[in-house]
Image (cartoon, grey):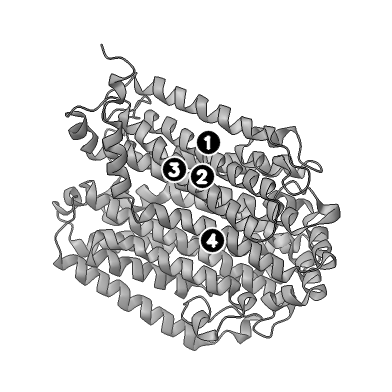
Amino acid sequence: MTGPRDSLTGTGHLIRLALRRDRVKLPIWVLAIGLGMQYAVSALGTVYSTPQERQVRAELMESPAATMMSGPGYGLNDYTLGAMISNEMVLWLAIPAAMMSIFLVIRHTRSEEETGRAELVRSAVVGRHAAPVAALVLAVAANAGIALLTALALIGGDLAAADAFAVGLGLGLTGLVFAGVATVTAQLTEHARSASSMAMAVLGAAFLVRAIGDAAGPGGSLLSWFSPLAWVQQQRPFVDLRWWPLLLPLVLVAAMTALAYALSARRDVGAGLLRARLGRPTAPRSLSSPFGLAVRQQRTSVIGWAIGLLVFAVPTGSLSDSVTEAALENPDMAEVFTANGQEPTDGFYATMAMFFALLIAAFAVTSVLRLRSEERTGHAEAALATAVSRRQWVSAWLGVTVLSSVVLLVVSGLGVGLGALSGDAPTGVVGEVLLATLAFFPPVLVVVGLAAALFGLRAGLAMWAWALVGYAFLFGMFGALLDLPAVFTELSPFSHLTVMPLDRIGALPLVTLSAVAAVLVLAGGLLFRRRDLDLR
């Protein structure tokens, strides 16, 4: 019988191994979130440079829809830069910190067991709990980096140091909460994909609970306190700072770690505590083709994205009247929505269409990256051992990705249009916003094509398709605000269609982008047919 110390044998070696494996990916996550805070301080300080401009923004944030999407609204009576960042930006940095922590923990725990590497490692002098503890230590280091960078960014904006460090600690602890959640879900199921989905479902539920709780009353309600995403904002930084809400994530992290420790001792390596559901005695006919199999594997993800986008799009659309009124009163804010010579209302719809198209491009990258997972887990090898060619296998998966992207574009466009319709928008706005969103299908195809081409060249290179999405988001959403040279914005495939009304969208960009996407997809298919499978 082994004691607590024996169960942690080899933890230091696993920490060094994890750092070696994530030496590129983890710094990118940490720096991206830290730079996000730096940008928020700089951009919001520039756009809303006077108390009068900030109060116009505060009036916009008083609506229930804005509260659901941002935060409880502390400090709206005297909307300082610090209060604005705390109320509107902190939540949207806490979510990627939580996602980073989930992916990190699952990668170094359940993924290792699913691929069989954990069994190989455990055959050496390595304790039962060494892997999850190593993953949690790495998560602590990553979230500490986020806490430090975000605090320094706030201090660099001449904001109070105590409040800045409170925000940084809150963001870091929020990430650790979901690292603990992922450590628990990694014990429940045999598959990394299922463990990640469970943890992401908890994150989605936390967002929904916080949104409903914050919208229930000024400063949030009792329901808000049941969401870990609410705690960092409930510190009231830059308004009336209180430190005690930080005890809540500390307690929850300790509880999740203890629970994961107990669950880990009750299962075998590679097994999950939840019994896998038995399948049908005979497979349905739809699974007899690569396309049907790809649909089956992606349907849960697509449904989850569709629900999330709809829940996000409807409140966003309902803000159209308030945002356009604020743009008319704030020249810097108006510049964001009138950069292409549009009316503020049309500019808002065009900007939101591009925003949701960028989110769907992110879905497309994650979808194509699952090809990499299928290859490295050996599933692709099993499929290709049958009468399925490489071209059929890749084409089926990319076909499902493309069709799913169309569905998500429709859901997003309808959501924004229906949200706008709840205000004073005319009935025809639903169709106009829907078509404007669908116009971004060719740029999304370019992202799919790039990911496919990189995957065809080498499985591990596919992740660099994220660089295009990040570049398009930065220069597409904030290029006008930052007053950058037009050449930087025009390099993004999403920058050529951000115009409304619809008759201003030319056919040439649509055709050109579609042709580029087709060439990239074909190149990916040809490259994949010529290389060996990557089973590392």
Q: Is residue 411 visible?
A: no
Q: Nearer the viewer, residue 31 or 412?
A: 31
2 vs 3, front mark: 3
Q: Earlier in the sequence, mark 1 or mark 2?
A: 2
Residue type marked 4: Leu
Of helix, strand and loop, which one carries label 3? helix
- Looking at the image, is 512 positioned above or below residue 261? below
Residue type marked 2: Ala
Q: Which mark is residue 177?
A: 1
Residue type marked 3: Ala
**x 73%, y 73%: residue:** 333
Q: Earlier in the sequence, mark 4 or mark 2?
A: 4
**Which quarter of the figure has residue 25?**
bottom left
How many angstroms separate mark 1 from mark 3 (CA)? 14 Å
**Which residue bears the numbered disc 3?**
141
Q: Residue furthest top?
A: 1
1 vs 4, front mark: 4
